[in-house]
Image: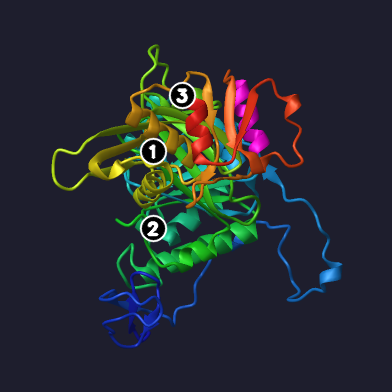
Amino acid sequence: MSKIKTAFFCQNCGYESAKWNGKCPSCGQWNTFVEERVQKDIPVKQEWKTIDNPLARTQKFVNLSDVEAVAEKRLLTPDNELNRVLGGGIVAGSLVLVGGEPGIGKSTLFLQNALQLKDIRTLYISGEESEQQIKMRADRINVSNDQFYLLTETSTQTIFAEIRKLQPQLVVVDSIQTLQSPFIESAPGSVSQIRETTAELQRFAKESNTPVFLIGHITKDGSIAGPKVLEHMVDTVLQFEGDQHYAYRILRTIKNRFGSTAELGIYEMTGTGLRQVTNPSEILISQREDLLSGVAISATMEGMRPLLVEVQALVTQSVYGTPQRTATGFDLRRLQLLLAVLEKRGGFHFGVKDVFLNIAGGLRVEDPAIDLAVLCALLSSYEDISLPNKVCFSGEVGLSGEIRAVNRIEQRIAEAEKLGFEKIFISRYNKKGIDFTKFNIEVIAVGRVEEVYRQLF
C-alpha cells in the first residue's frame, strides 16, 4: 500500500510546507495554510495518450536554429469579440482560463460559442450543472449543433476515458474548481487538486493539439480562486466582468501568449444569450433631448478600442459639516485630486460642496484621458450651465492645472467624428506631428484648465 503523505498548502499562492505556518513565507498572507493529503507514489496514467498525435516527439532536445517558425493555426469563431480578445481566434493546443463573478454569464458565453461552432466536435464538461440544466440554457440560446456533446463528470480519470473515445476538437471545462484527480487525496477546489487537474489538462492540450477552455471561480477580492501558479500554467487568462444591474459585459485579456493584452470585447446580456456590441459608443452615450448641466462626453480608450463615455457630475451645497465625495466607475482619489486642482488653480470653492460623479453605463474607466471630461462636468454642474451637445473631451489634467497629452489621439478623434461630434478638446501637446486637416471635426487644442473654462463658460 502506498504511503500517504500530508502537507500544508497556502490557499492564496499554493506554497507547500511540511508544517503549519501562521504567515505564508511566499506571499505574506496570514492564516492561509490548510492541511491536505497528498499521495505521490502512484504514477499518473494518462488515458488520452492513446490519441494519434502527429506532433508527438521522440527526441528530448533540439537546436533552436533547426526549429521551423510557422504561424500558429487559429480557429475562427462566429463571435468576433472573442476572436479579437484571443488575438485573432482560438489557437490549437492552447489552454485558456476564464474568470468572473457568479452569474455574470461565463457559462452562457462559452456554451453559446460552442454551439455556434457547427463544424467542430466540441465536448462541454460540466461539474456544476446537470444535463437538463444545460439543455434548458441551450434552448434559451436557441442554437442547435449536432457536433456538440455533454459530459457531467468531475473525475479526470473518467473525463480522459471519454475524451479518448470521442476525440473532440475543442474542450470546455465548467469549472476547474469542481474537478478532482484520483491521484490527489484532497477535496475538489483545494490548491493541490486545482494544480494537478490543470496540469493534466495542460498535458492533454499540448500533446493532442486540442484547445481547452477552463472556466474558473473568483475570490471575494476579484482574483481567480486557487493558487497563483494556475495563471502561470495557462496560455491565456480572460476576465469576464460587469455589473449585474446593467446589461453590458466586458471580456478583458489579462495574459495572452498568442496576442495583445490590450484588447477587450463588449457584450449585452439578453434573454436569448449574449449579443455582441459592435459599436459600444452609441450605447454608452444616453440619447437625451434636453441639455442638462453636469454632463460631459469623454473620448477614452479601452485597450485598443476607442469609446465615447458619458460622465455625469452633481455639485450641491453641503448640508452637513463634512462635504461628501462619491464616485461610481471612477477612482475616488483621482476625483479628490481634480477637485484640489480646481480649488487651487481655478479658485472654485469645492471645499464646501458635496460632489457626486458617475460614469454612465456601469463601466469602470481608468484611462487618464477622462480627466478633462470629469473636470468639465464638475464645472458645468458648479456653474449650472449645460455644455454644448456636440462637444467631447480627451486630455489628462496635471497637478499644476495643465492639460497633458494622451496616446492614440487620432483614434479618439476619428471615433468622435464618426458619432457626429462637431468639436473635441485635446491637449496642445498632442498637435505635434499630426495632420488634423484630414478630420471633419473641429479640434480645439488647450494647454491649461483656465483656457477650457473661458471657451466653454
Marks 2 and 1 sit apart, C-alpha to C-alpha, by: 17 Å
Residue sitting at 34 percent across and 88 percent down? 18
Marks 3 and 1 sit apart, C-alpha to C-alpha, by: 20 Å
N-term-proximal mark, 2 vs 1: 1
Between marks 2 and 1 in the image, the one whose residue lies nearer the viewer: 2
Does 409 sit left or right of 238 as displayed?
A: right
Q: Which residue is mark 1?
A: 105
Between marks 3 and 2 in the image, the one whose residue lies nearer the viewer: 3
What amino acid type is highlighted by mark number 1? Answer: Gly
Disc 3 and disc 2 in contact, CB within 8 angstroms: no
The quarter of the displayed image where residue 208 is located: bottom right
Predominant SS along the magenta part: helix
Q: Secondary structure at mark 2?
A: loop
Q: Along the line of sight, which residue is nearer the eye, 241 or 270?
A: 241
The quarter of the displayed image where residue 441 is located: top right
Q: Secondary structure at mark 1?
A: loop
N-term-proximal mark, 3 vs 1: 1
How many other residues sit within 10 Å of disc 1, few (<14), some (14-19) or many (≥20)? some
Does 403 sit left or right of 409 as displayed?
A: left
**Please, is residue 316 above or below residue 95 in the view?**
above
